[in-house]
Image (cartoon, rainbow, N blue to C red):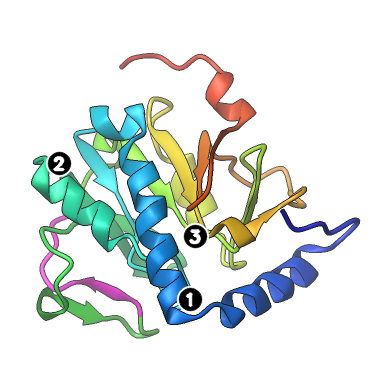
Amino acid sequence: MQEQPNISKTELRNSMRSVLKAMSQSQRRSCSMKACKRLSELDAFDRALVVMLYMPLPDELDLTSAAIRCFQTAKNVCVPYVDWRREDMYAVEATTFDDEQMELDERGLRRPRKGRPIPVSTIDLIVVPGLAFDTQGNRLGRGGGFYDRFLERLSRRTTRVGICFDEQIVQSVPRDAHDAAMDQVVTDRRTTTGPARLRMRPKH
């Protein structure tokens, strides 16, 4: 666990980018598969019919093996479609993670060439990337606020799972009032449950 007393968000982002840059491709690949295995073992993952994953950046944990598990178990998968002009993102269906069925948006993020919109009310579980997480479920994003705004629109019954390499777990993430917390955080070495998971949520 990284220690960072009285560190700012900017300082922590810079620190975590250095941590990610130092990881080898083989380390990323191995740790990604271990984290995806832990993700697939969650009760919330097992129960979910609609799962929202993300299309990883080169330094992010790769969710391909989790996507394959979803396809094998007949889950519906959706991924983000970012509208950079409106500074917003939406969920669109992904039936494969194959590169041939993907395109790059204006900022180099992968997205399905043909993906129908998925209503946020139908998403049972969302897997959220981040530059850092703590064991209380707090998340540090890349600074755009896209996920924080999107998470506000989700149903209270939707399980929010942060995922990262274990090197990205820190003692405490600096947070603002609008920052969304995760129900659980999964890494290649552990699964933690945050206070957000303890609150009662309606079944429907």
Picture coordinates of residue 97, whole percent (x, y): 18, 67
- Circle 3 sits on which residue? 146
Residue appearing at x 41%, y 77% in the figure: 26
Q: Nearer the viewer, mark 1 or mark 3?
A: 1
Which label's residue is closer to the chain start, 1 or 2? 1
Question: Counting other residues with Cα less than 10 Å from the Cα at mark 3, is it few (<14), some (14-19), or many (20 or more)?
Answer: some
CA–CA distance in space, label 1 to label 3 = 19 Å
Separation of marks 1 and 2 at Cα, in angstroms:
26 Å
- Asked if labels 2 and 1 touch by Cβ distance under 8 angstroms, the answer is no
Q: Amino acid at mark 3?
A: Phe
State the residue position of label 1: 59
- For image coordinates 75% across by 66% down, the residue present is 12
Q: Whole-percent x and y of residue 179?
A: 64, 47
111 inside magenta stretch: yes
Q: Is 184 located above or below residue 54 in the figure?
A: above
Q: Which residues are magenta?
A: 109-116
Direction from residue 149 to residue 22 in the image, left or right: right
Residue at x-position 58% and y-position 81%:
21
Q: Earlier in the sequence, mark 3 or mark 2?
A: 2
Give the residue type at disc 2: Lys
Are the residues flagged by discs 1 and 3 in contact, CB closer than 8 Å? no
Q: CA distance from mark 3 to mark 2?
A: 25 Å
* Residue 181 image position (x, y, % from top left): 59, 40
